[in-house]
Amino acid sequence: MPTPARRPCAKCGRNRAEKFFKSARGRVCVTCQRARTRTTSHANRIQATYNITADEYAAILAAQDGACAICQQTRSYRLNVDHCHASGQVRGLLCRLCNGRLLTAARDRPEVLRRAADYLESPPALAVVGERIVPVTEPAPRRRRRRAA
């Protein structure tokens, strides 16, 4: 069995088999093309949707130390661009949980989030029944449902 022809990628320099190039004259392997497309499409989407450039996105991310502006967690995925739906103002970069659940549940109202913080710091049940500790038990193993045949 003959060995497949190989050639270097102009971008990453790896010596790759012909199957990794889209055409016989292609100079960049499909892996590098996908990476470039993914970056370009993200830049185009944030420019079209939020009117910020990829450099501005990177500057906001750097100002937030690479983490979500609310929970301060670094994520393995790109952070969402958060904006005010009433004014359109870009506010910062948030993880999916903070952007999709926390702010959505509060309906972008700061007073709701302030009350939530007050609730966590001073729970009302503490004043009524005192400190009650719920016994921690091991969760029961989840049973799998059988598929209907």
Image: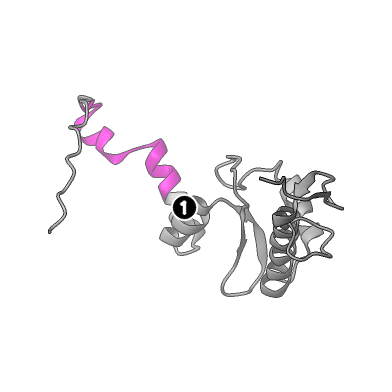
In front here: 129 or 40? 40
Question: Is-magenta flag for residue 133?
Answer: yes
Residue 28 image point, x, y percent? 81, 57
Other-residue count near label 1 (Cα within 10 Å), few / some / many at <14 / 14–19 / ≥20: some
Residue 63 image point, x, y percent? 75, 46
Q: Amino acid at mark 1?
A: Leu
Residue 45 image point, x, y percent? 68, 69
Above or below 36: residue 1: above
Quarter of the image where the N terminus is located: top right
Identified at 48% across, 58% down, the residue is 100
**Which residue of the protein is positioned furthest toward the right in this rendering?**
10
- In this picture, residue 68 sits left or right of residue 14: left
Residue 44 occupies quadrant? bottom right
Identified at 45% across, 44% down, the residue is 117
Secondary structure category for the residue under label 1: helix
- Marks counted in the figure total 1
Above or below 30: residue 122: above
Residue 38 image point, x, y percent? 69, 60
- In this picture, residue 43 sits left or right of residue 136: right
Identified at 82% across, 63% down, the residue is 26
Question: Is-magenta flag for residue 125?
Answer: yes
**Which residue of the protein is positioned furthest toward the left in this rendering?**
149
Magenta segment: 116-134
**Which residue of the protein is positioned furthest toward the front in this rendering?**
1
Residue bearing the label numbered 1: 113
In front here: 23 or 71? 23
In front here: 87 or 73? 73
| Magenta span dominant secondary structure | helix
